Image (cartoon, helix red, strand yellow):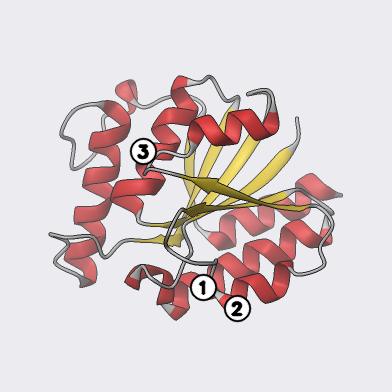
């Protein structure tokens, strides 16, 4: 099953997309996927400008890269139209975790995508209501799971979590990618 990196809304008009920690971890994923000659898709929300220049710089000239425009928070239908089938392993990074990332992941799950990994430290969220700092991380992940599972869950019950959805950080995922690519 082909593993595709999907970068969601890393456009500088979103404050969370300007966070250097998030940008650096997205770049780390891009380098890993490029090294393995894997497909990369940057999903952008219409009218919010181009993907962050530091990310675009890594993707310029890469022949296995595509840019995809979406008109709303959930970009799953556009991804399915581009990929033509849900028989993919998607690795997701980007912003905003409790909005576009969560709604796209939920849509992908509903469309039956085979495997979805969300890279926790390559996602960020500074949406309205987010208190920031460590409390903001808990807030974002609480809202992410609420959207994914259709109920409020600050700590998700594993019995209600989709079996084809995993959350990793870049260290764990990069180690797994190295193993998968060799």
Q: Horizontally, is 31 left or right of 162 in the view?
A: right
Please state which of the two labelled residues, at mark 1 or mark 2, is closer to the viewer: 2
**What residue would you read off at disc 1?**
23
Q: CA distance from mark 3 to mark 1?
A: 21 Å
Which residue occupies 22% across, 44% down? 143
Q: In the rendered structure, which disc, 1 or 2, sits on the residue that comes first in sequence?
A: 1
Which residue occupies 36% across, 38% down? 103
Task: Looking at the picture, tell me which residue is in the foreground, 88 or 182.
Answer: 88
Which residue occupies 26% across, 61% down? 137
Residue 162 circle label? none
Q: Horizontally, is 34 left or right of 159 in the view?
A: right
Q: As displayed, is residue 78 above or below residue 20?
A: above
Which element type, helix, strand or loop, lies under badge 2?
helix
Tell me the quarter of the image containing the N terminus: top right
Picture quadrant where residue 54 is located: bottom right
Please state which of the two labelled residues, at mark 3 or mark 1, is closer to the viewer: 3
**What residue would you read off at disc 2?**
54
Q: As displayed, is residue 53 above or below residue 111?
A: below
Residue 103 circle label? 3
Q: Residue 163: x percent and y percent?
A: 47, 24
Q: Horizontally, is 121 left or right of 161 in the view?
A: right
Q: CA distance from mark 3 to mark 2?
A: 25 Å
Task: Looking at the picture, tell me which residue is in the foreground, 77 or 111.
Answer: 77
């Amino acid at each position: 099953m082909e593993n595709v990196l999907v970068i969601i809304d890393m456009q500088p008009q979103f404050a969370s997309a300007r966070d250097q920690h998030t940008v650096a971890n997205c770049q780390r994923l891009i380098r890993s996927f490029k090294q393995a000659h894997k497909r990369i898709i940057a999903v952008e929300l219409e009218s919010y400008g181009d993907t962050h220049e530091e990310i675009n710089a890594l993707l310029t000239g890469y022949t296995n890269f595509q840019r995809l425009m979406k008109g709303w928070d959930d970009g799953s239908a556009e991804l399915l139209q581009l990929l033509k089938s849900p028989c993919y392993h998607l690795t997701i990074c980007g912003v905003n975790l409790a909005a576009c990332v969560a709604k796209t992941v939920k849509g992908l799950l509903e469309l039956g995508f085979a495997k979805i990994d969300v890279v926790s430290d390559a996602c960020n969220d500074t949406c309205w209501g987010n208190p920031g700092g460590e409390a903001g991380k808990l807030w974002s992940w609480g809202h992410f799971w609420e959207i994914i599972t259709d109920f409020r869950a600050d700590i998700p019950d594993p019995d209600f979590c989709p079996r084809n959805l995993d959350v990793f950080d870049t260290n764990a995922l990069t180690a797994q990618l190295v193993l998968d690519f060799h």
